[in-house]
Image: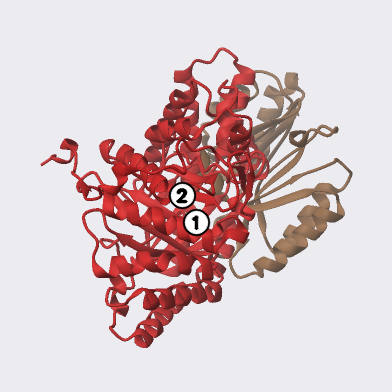
Chain colours: A red, B brown
Amino acid sequence: MLSYQEIISTLEMLKNEHLDVRTVTLGINLFDCASHDLGMLKTRIRDKIGRIAEALVPVCDQVGDKYGIPIVNKRIAVSPIAVVCAPLGPDGMLEIARTLDECARSMNVDFIGGFSALVEKGIAAGDRALIAAIPEALTETERVCASVNVASTKAGINMDAVLLMGRAIKTAAERTAERDGLACAKLCVFANIPQDVPFMAGAYLGIGEPDSVINVGVSGPGVVRKAVDRALAAHPDLDLGQLSDLIKRTACKVTRVGELIGREVAELLKIRFGVVDLSLAPTPNVGDSVGEIFQSLGLLAIGVPGTTAALALLNDAVKKGGAFASSHVGGLSGAFIPVSEDLNISDAVAAGHLSLEKLEAITSVCSVGLDMVALPGDTSAETLSAIIADEMAIGVINKKTTATRLIPVPGKKAGDRAYFGGLLGESVIMAVNNGAGPNLFIRHGGLIPAPIQSLTN
Amino acid sequence: MTKVIISVLGKDRPGIVAAVSRVLFECDCNIENVSQTILQTEFAGIFIAAIPAGVTPEGLREGLAARLEAFKMYVQVKPLAANGSPAPPPAAEPFVITTIGPDAKGLVARITAVIAGYQVNVTNLLAVFKGGNEPGDNIMIYEVDVPTDIDQQAFRRDLQNQATALGLRLTIQHRNIFSAMNRI
């Protein structure tokens, strides 16, 4: 018999606190589609995705109905296309991007990830072709997401790739200038990319993964915030150890929901269940914000002194709660701080509380990195690369995932607003120190060696 | 060994279960199941007990009534139907239906009419009507077993239509979601 309190608290989380399953992401291995013949390759990719993903959306809707929990996004992640399509040149890669976009439309998923390359130690021919195709691919397609891993703790930082990505981002922004550089919102540059991320734009299916797998991303910043508010209203003198424990218990509940839903979807699809990615992923809706949690914890806004410590507490408590709730926690699992996707965080930028430098600092204690950051349109490719390199260094040295999703908004300057629409939100453009100037450090290229932390054997 | 079902109803006060169980003990009866609940000020208890040869349901009822006289309780004792081989219950999945909304006469009757119309069995019901606008003050929670072979969509649709007509916000969710979130 369920208790009255158990039922009421669960209903509150669902109805008023935005508890949902943010994404069910179906990973599909495409290596068995490989062919030197472009036509054959496209047909095989279409057939395989069609065969495995056909039931994804109806099954997710059915399970969402059964439990009364919305599965907000259904997505597909495929093997890194730079490897699957290694014999192709940039034009062939572009064709594959179009094919993936068609597949996403016909399967009715909102994004398909895996237009990806892993180049942390060196760039192979397929990788180079894919990176060259990224700006046009993300301009022409609507639902394709790209990611490039340019660094790892084991390999160091591939500065040649970092420079290439700075240029790719600049070009992608220019090609979508009339949409404030929207193409860049579908491109992540990573250090230590996990193989099983369900969240976009970084989702791809790793090389060590099964032929197909269901990974689930749960969210719930609103649930955490309300739990903190309620507890402090009842007991204003709670200390931070007690608040950490409260967040941990809340994260545990949220993770259990993701695991239950993910396992059932996987069972109905007869596909293996992979991981729950427990990330506090905000949306631009009021009450669904990570930034608001900082205010509930007593800070004026995200970005003021105390932010890094508060985020360290939050991120750690979320992980501990998630790890207890599920034996298969993976992906990014932490608190996201995507600027334009979180109304409260973009407001903190507009009010002058959060700068690019402080944002970078706090990414050392959370996932994922400089996410959905709008920058002035005159930010040079070299400066973009330098920002990426700094963020990669934080990931490499701290043995964690970091990433950038930078959008140099053409024709706009610091303080202007950029609009991306829907879940991608809008944001004030952040100022960049020496943004348009040259950067000789970046031009040196080469590899920054793997740090001493990599020698673990 | 005969089994009886004993129901005891009346105003709640300390000592009711002690009095009933004392009489059963003195009559050499063995209690197999007990369930009790309190609604506002009223006590209701159900006992299933095995009674030895020589003790009759009527005799037991008289003994209980005498012991409970000071409590002003209503007591009923009746033999439990022999088990036989009851038809196995249909395959079903446990769901929780909740409604929140303004109090009115006939809410339980109208919602349960829909539930019964689909041969859905209510296994637990908790309803609180305190009036006012506080969501938690006017709530019905039905735990139900929904047969797997009924038209689930039609059942949901009819429930929602009835709730809308009554001005209620209704949710129907599989029980596992509550268990997963609240039980380790």
Q: Vertically, is A75 above or below B68?
A: below
Residue at screen point 57% across, 20% down: A298
Residue at the far right in the pictured view: B105
- The dot on residue A405 is 2
- Nearer-the-camera pick, A192 or A357: A357
Q: Vertically, is A445 above or below A451?
A: below
- The dot on residue A184 is 1
Tell me, yes or no, if residue A212 can be seen here.
no
For label 2, the crowd category at 10 Å Cα-Cα, with few meaning under 14, some 14 to 19 and many 20 or more, is many
For label 1, the crowd category at 10 Å Cα-Cα, with few meaning under 14, some 14 to 19 and many 20 or more, is many
Tell me the SS state at disc 1.
helix
Query: Quick one: quadrant of the N terminus of chain A?
Result: top right
Q: Disc 2 residue type? A: Arg
Question: Upstream in the sequence, badge 1 or badge 2?
Answer: 1
Could you tell whether A299 is left or right of A365 in the image?
right
Rendering coords of residue A200 (x, y %): 47, 56
Q: CA distance from mark 1 to mark 2?
A: 7 Å
